[in-house]
Image (spheres, coloured by chain):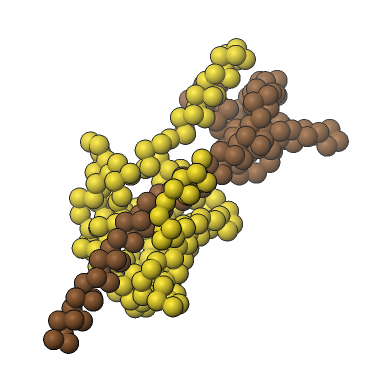
Chain colours: A yellow, B brown
Amino acid sequence: MDARRESEVAPMKNRTTVERKSERELVVTRTFNGPARLVFEAWTKPELFRQWWVPKSMGMSLLSCEMDVRVGGRYRLEFAHGDSQSAFFGTYKEVTPHSRLVWTNEESDEGSVTTVTFAEKGGKTLLVMHELYPSKEALDAAGTGAADAMGETFEQLDELLVTLGASAGRS
Amino acid sequence: MPRSPRSPDATRRGVLEQLGRADASITDLAEKFHMTLTGMKKHVGVLEQAGLVTTEKVGRVRTCKLGPRRLEEEAAWIERYRQLWDARFDELDKVVEELKRKEKVDGRKKRE
């Protein structure tokens, strides 16, 4: 299903890849058709960041976005999702203009450390985002949460289990 | 904290989560979920029939692991995560294009 969608997009669109490097690590990559300077700017200026972080397909809206992008500075994003609200916050650990950003995520003890690198080549920028979670469970939970944020859930599995339960008799 | 009794579905989901962390014998699972061996065998049997779990008997121990169908679910999860970032990055493309356009305009103004 994905292959079909890929062939329909404009040729200029770059591909996003996600790889689970280990039980605790996820790596997301994408190339952007612009210099690292501009891609970095879009990650570090709140007025730009808020234009892309919450795409419409997420079914959420961004209520506020505060970012103090310097080592030890904090960020805080607040979202509305239907009637409920949530926040995403943490601290910048490394800020190297146009090449590297590291921040922690502190909503829980199970938060990840995210490292984003920007590598420019021929006017394009390869972005690599590396997320390190404290445990496999934390990564699983975060991934499921993000998948849920896309408006889809693992209800299918739950339904399947209910069906199985019904066919096998309630033990 | 006293455990509330789980429904059969919750137990099966729990077993899948547990096997996602590590393979386990039926005895391990029964202990973990405070059930009899017979009770756990039934749950594992249901999951095995559905392709969610596979079991292998080595010596006297039957080891359970995630089956092909559950592994596909995990791949599906990664794919959804990819879609989330792809959607974000499509928007980021637009922001970068806009910044490039602005720079060009500003550059022109400076030269004038």
- Towards the viewer: B37 or A80: A80
* Residue closest to the eye, B4 or B104: B104
Using the rendered view, name the quadrant where residue B96 is placed: bottom left
The location of residue B73, given as percent across then percent down, is 56, 38
Up the image or down, A55 lies above or below A100; here it is above
Residue A127: which quarter of the image?
A: bottom left
Q: Residue A121 at x, y = what percent?
A: 45, 77
| Percent x, y of residue B29 | 65, 32
The structure residue drawn at horizontal position 59% and vertical position 39%, both measured from the top left corner, is: B72
Q: Residue furthest bottom?
A: B111
Q: Position of residue A111 (x, y in %)?
A: 42, 55
Residue at image location 59% in from the left, 57% down from the top: A22
Residue nearest the viewer, comparing B9 with A43: A43
Q: Residue furthest right?
A: B59
Task: Decide if residue A111 is in sight here.
Answer: yes
Q: Is residue B81 visible?
A: no
